[in-house]
Amino acid sequence: MEQSDIENILAGVSDPITGEDLVSARAVKGVAVDGARVAVDIVLGYPAASLVDDLAGTIQSELEARPEIEAAVVNIAWKVASHKVQGELTPLPDVKNVLAVASGKGGVGKSTTAVNLALALTREGATVGLLDADIYGPSQPKMMGLSGRPDSHDGKTIEPKINHGVQTMSIGYLIDEDTPMVWRGPMVTQALQQLISETNWSGLDYLIVDMPPGTGDIQLTLAQRVPVSGAIIITTPQDIALLDARKGLRMFEKVDVPVLGVVENMSTHICSQCGHEEPIFGEGGGARMAETYGVELLGSLPLDIRIREQTDGGIPTVVAEPDSDIAEAYRQIALKAAGRLSTQARNMKIQFPNIVVQNT
């Protein structure tokens, strides 16, 4: 059996997240044939710790189902690339991809979703940072169970605070909890840029940015001046939330930031007493929005008291109940978003730096 025969077999195996076949996705990095023995190396473009064993088993079964193959060894790894950002911007140092988690209005669970997605990506094997971009109402310190001022080793840059394996930064670390941020727009945007650029992020695959609601100064600053690889839109099923979520989606489209998908939060209410599930905010709104704008519905999340209690306690659901149905929903959304990003164009400015020829 030849290498091309093995590749033909692999072309019949689909990536469980992107849906592309492994050959078209360029995930096949090596094929070795030694008589009736075969070895295959697969490299996915997104973290996939929970998928490796099942995918390896599927590939092995497909290969060993052929009578010419006596045994097959399948090695699966992943490598997150730096993907294209808007305009002429280049990725941040030590940050491969910035992902904005946004909504058009407040109260839709955007911050709770952002923190759980960051934790889900971490559990899948990625190195993840979480930036709280809500200068007026920072919430991530409480959600991540962190407090106190961050360290600075050189007096110029600050070290991210870390918990649950996630590097974090928030204006909430630099001010007292009950201190109001009575700042005008220019001061807020300058503070945001400093938090992003003057934090010593370390080897991040993804920097999740928890955006404030709306489409004002902070959102425009991030969309125009910060290199963003993709955006995730959070909404609830009700019409008023969808109206504002559409504005957020259109803003990213206008500045050439790809929207990786829509997450419908609070899609159903789960009663804490009897477990009855009911769509109290309506149903299908996220799916209709995704269809209208040609983006993916990444998933739906319930309105469940455990999510609020665990996040308020500084131990979000993905950490507090990693084997629960809710944690699995967050994991699937995180995988779909990362998988979707992996199919986007890569950022070539890192791979091919400018070369200047001078007479000497």
Image (cartoon, grey):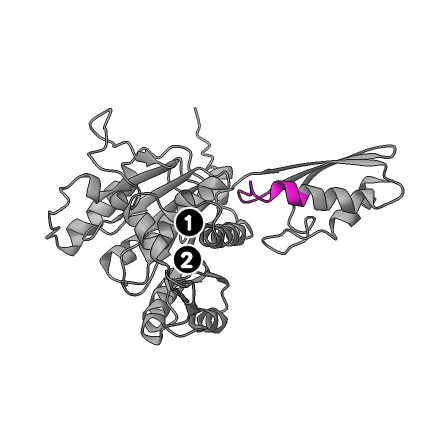
Mark 2: amino acid: Ile
Label 2–label 1 contact, CB within 8 A: yes
Classify 10 Å Cα crowding around label 1: few (below 14), some (14-19), many (20 and above).
Answer: many
Q: Quadrant of residue 224?
A: bottom left
The span shown in magenta is: 44-55
Left or right relative to 288: residue 16: right
Label 2 element class:
strand
Residue nearest the viewer, comparing 352 with 192: 192
Residue 42 at what x, y percent from top left?
66, 40
Quadrant location, the C terminus: top left
Classify 10 Å Cα crowding around label 2: few (below 14), some (14-19), many (20 and above).
Answer: many
Mark 1: amino acid: Leu
Residue nearest the viewer, comparing 41 with 111: 111
Q: Earlier in the sequence, mark 2 or mark 1?
A: 1
Residue nearest the viewer, comparing 266 with 170: 266
Q: Residue at x 34, y 73 (%)?
A: 243
